Image (tube, rainbow, N blue to C red):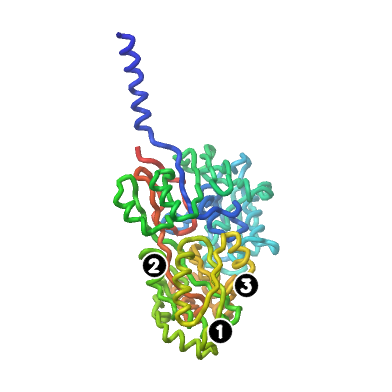
Amino acid sequence: MKHRTFLLASALPLALATAVSAQTDITVALQLEPPHLDPTSAAAGAIDSVLYSNVFEGLTRFASDGAVIPGLAKSWDISDDGLTYTFMLNDGVTFHDGSAMDGEDVKFSLDRARAEDSVNAQKALFAGISDVSVMDPVTVKVTLSEPNGNFLFNMAWGDAVIVAPESIEGIKNTPIGTGAFKFANWVQGDKIELTRNDAYWGTPAVLTDVTFKFISDPTAAMSAVMAEDVDVFSGFPTPEALPQFEADPRFQVIVGNSEGETILSTNNKMPPLDNVKVRQAIAHAIDRQAIIDGAMFGLGTPIGTHFAPHHPDYVDLTGSSNYDPAKAKQLLAEAGFPDGFTTTLKLPPPSYARRGGEIIAAQLRSVGIQTEISNLEWAQWLEQVFRGKDFGLTIVSHTEPFDIGIYARPDYYFQYDNPEFQQVMETLNKATKPAERSALLAIAQKMISADYVNGYLFQLAFPTVAKAGVQGLWENAPTQATDLTAVSWAD
């Protein structure tokens, strides 16, 4: 009897320890699967959704509130003329294969991104770099051709992460970074698995194992969360179900802001969309609130230009493209299309696009514009629309932070070519005084609104549904990231 009591007593602390020990693995669902795993050679935000900060890091990085903070560079000095940035790197940083990360890797990464044959989707971020010099293993000097008030911000993008030369050949399938998690496995069409990097140079992650599950169908997303098959669904695609989860004590619902300007993107070089009156007619044919209510169940903030409403320099220009079908018909007649016309509407997978596309098609039809709808997978959308520019209209949310500068790129997929706007953005890049930058940003917003470059719909809300015990998730989405480096389970 004493022997039995001894065994029970010694087993009790173990049982208690097991009961109170926090979980260290997590399964996070996302709607979109990355086309590959190299953030430096694709425009797909789904890559950063998995890899930003978790696996790859840059010289600087975005914090959860959108602030630019140190990353692989612990500090930097800026010359008085604004042309030279000297970055002091953290010492002792290693890549996941055990090799050292030093100034040569920084030079390689920046030179590769700005090279003539670069396939970086945001190559313009690096265009102002004239030289990258390695002063010593932990000191790198970057020289610009002209001052750029956005440079540290640009270096925080996922497109600017630091990679090793020897990892490039296999980077699309087996990424090797410096982050708090290491890539472990990718079952295409299903999941990506990460494991904790126990040799991480910074604050180590609490989680030991991470699984990203890809669930594109909104109905399946609802079922997976309700059945607790996943722990978190980041960017939950079924907003009409959020009240149900809010009422269930098993879950928490987090609704934050994103940088996602959701637009009816327009091919400005394709007739008759190359006619500003036609684009203006489209803008006045759109009822933004009906789209927000019908596609997003009320989640979303109307916008009248390509700028985030939560940004302090936002200008509300929704009035210049108010819903007015009669005016839309009048403008079409003035443009020479009294009976309307037909164009394509190519829709990527997200529910805001598929659901919103049906609503917009009906709204355009009411003023005489017929749309031939094609539902595309992301790889098809990137090939046909983004790279091939083979489209009339499409719906997409531009979730890159502070990205109004894309309108200064004539070869960008919606092909807006306005030298006056390009000059405004060039002046903005050189400006460092806050008041001057604010004035230029107001001009830029008004210019693209007045040119009706695209149909500006709404700022995408960012809803997340998670189990009640998950803590440390980002509320807002200042960049396309599911940053798990500070996530844990409550004891």
Q: Nearer the viewer, mark 2 or mark 3?
A: 2
Three-letter code for the amino acid on which mark 1 is drawn: Asn
Residue 57 appears left or right of 489:
right
Three-letter code for the amino acid on which mark 2 is drawn: Gly
The residue shown at (45%, 59%) is 478
Horizontal and vertical percent for residue 306? 47, 72
Does residue 43 appear anywhere in the picture?
yes
Q: Is residue 349 above or below residue 432?
A: above
Badge 2 or badge 1: first in the primary sequence: 1
Q: Label 2, on which residue?
A: 294
The residue shown at (57%, 41%) is 184
Residue 422 appears left or right of 8:
right
Q: Secondary structure beneath disc 2? A: helix
Horizontal and vertical percent for residue 185? 58, 42
Spatial CA distance of label 3 from label 1 is 18 Å
Q: Label 3, on which residue?
A: 411
Badge 3 or badge 1: first in the primary sequence: 1
Q: Label 1, on which residue?
A: 275
Q: Secondary structure beneath disc 3? A: loop
Horizontal and vertical percent for residue 407? 55, 73
Three-letter code for the amino acid on which mark 3 is drawn: Asp
